[in-house]
Image: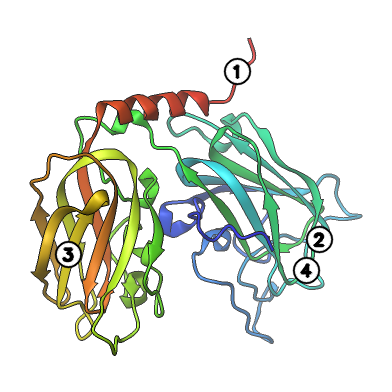
């Protein structure tokens, strides 16, 4: 299987994705497609419409009605899509035989029927009860995705993995979180993620429960845990926010923060359980990465790093926004 795991799922509900419209959802709701958790199945669980599935399932169309079924998603953040996974978990006698996937790049908040589409994945065969991965090489920025299933059937999850392209209009003169997933921040290395991965720290919103943050295994040696996060762009950080929400008996004792090239941002500092901590930073040096240390181990729910992109970074962001805008017919 193609590994898209290092890139965020831009369609996930936890990243702000939403399902706008579908041709049909008679047997199972379209909103199930973007649940962040893996699909589940309980056999012999029947509703008045039949066996209950944790996914999106349409009624039988083949031989009864022309055409095929489709669903439209709005991504939580605009990005260049690198891979899409059509997960047909538990759909065995009722999965689509093929799929086709399109993308759209739109400004503002248009309705589903106002979008203009371009191809991301050509018509491709699907297998039932498995994750079907497709690499995407289209260079354009994508804000919406349309999944066509041919002719009908069920899909458990749709994962749209890609690189966030932040809108430069929202970078200057407003608070800008340099490490947020939806702005392009990415965890590139970490010491441990036994209970839950460090990328959880960069998700939008407040942590919902303990496993929604980053939690490491208990350390039994004189070392500490850490995570390296690449910023959305080179910048001078001014405020760090480190939340231990829901971690009561398993929060770190201390945290520390460094920029790349060992730029000190925050010395080892004691933190409290189940608390949001804010720290003013005094560095004037631009950085591109941060090292967040958790001493000796434990859980961090959310990590925010606010700051000001460098002038060169702003130029780069504007150029990337322009270069990933699809060409319009003259």
Quarter containing the C terminus: top right
Percent across and percent down for residue 237 are 18, 44
Q: CA distance from mark 2 to mark 1?
A: 38 Å
Apparent side of residue 246 relative to residue 217 in the rendered image (left or right): left
Residue under pointer 1: 328
Q: CA distance from mark 2 to mark 4?
A: 16 Å
Dot 3: element: strand
Residue under pointer 2: 60
Sequence-wise first label, 1 or 4: 4
Residue under pointer 3: 256
- Local packing at callout 2 (Cα closer than 10 Å; few below 14, some 14-19, many 20+) is some
Q: CA distance from mark 3 to mark 2?
A: 57 Å
Of circles 3 and 4, the one toward us is 3
Quarter containing the N terminus: bottom right
Residue 294: quarter of image: bottom left
Percent across and percent down for residue 222 are 23, 84
Sequence-wise first label, 2 or 4: 2
Question: Which residue is pictured at 60% across the width and 71% down the height?
Answer: 54
Residue under pointer 4: 128
How many tags in the picture? 4
Question: Which residue is pictured at 31% across the width and 69% down the height?
Answer: 208
- Local packing at callout 1 (Cα closer than 10 Å; few below 14, some 14-19, many 20+) is few
Q: CA distance from mark 3 to mark 4?
A: 47 Å
């Amino acid at each position: 299987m193609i590994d898209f795991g290092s890139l965020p799922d831009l369609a996930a509900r936890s990243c702000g994705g939403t399902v706008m419209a579908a041709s049909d959802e008679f047997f199972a709701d379209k909103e199930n497609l973007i649940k962040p958790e893996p699909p589940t199945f309980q056999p012999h669980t029947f509703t008045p419409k039949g066996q209950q599935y944790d996914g999106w399932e349409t009624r039988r169309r083949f031989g009864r009605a022309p055409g095929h079924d489709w669903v439209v998603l709005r991504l939580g953040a605009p990005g260049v899509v690198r891979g899409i996974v059509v997960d047909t978990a538990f759909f065995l006698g009722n999965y689509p035989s093929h799929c086709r996937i399109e993308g759209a790049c739109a400004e503002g908040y248009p309705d589903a029927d106002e979008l203009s589409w371009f191809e991301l994945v050509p018509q491709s065969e699907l297998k039932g009860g498995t994750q079907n991965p497709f690499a995407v090489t289209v260079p354009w920025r994508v804000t919406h995705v349309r999944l066509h299933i041919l002719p009908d059937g069920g899909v458990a999850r749709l994962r749209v993995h890609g690189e966030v392209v932040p809108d430069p209009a929202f970078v200057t003169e407003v608070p800008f979180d340099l490490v947020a997933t939806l702005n392009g921040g990415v965890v590139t290395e970490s010491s441990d993620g036994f209970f839950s991965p460090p990328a959880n720290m960069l998700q939008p919103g407040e942590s919902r429960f303990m496993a929604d943050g980053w939690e490491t295994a208990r350390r039994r040696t004189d070392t500490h845990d850490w995570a390296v996060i690449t910023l959305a762009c080179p910048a001078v950080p001014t405020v760090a926010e480190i939340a231990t929400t829901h971690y009561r008996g398993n929060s770190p004792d201390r945290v520390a923060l460094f920029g790349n090239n060992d730029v000190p941002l925050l010395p080892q500092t004691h933190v409290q359980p189940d608390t949001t901590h804010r720290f003013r930073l005094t560095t004037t040096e631009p950085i591109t990465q941060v090292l967040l240390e958790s001493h000796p181990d434990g859980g961090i729910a959310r990590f925010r790093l606010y700051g000001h992109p460098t002038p060169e970074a702003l130029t780069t962001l504007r150029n990337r926004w322009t270069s990933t805008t699809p060409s319009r017919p003259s």
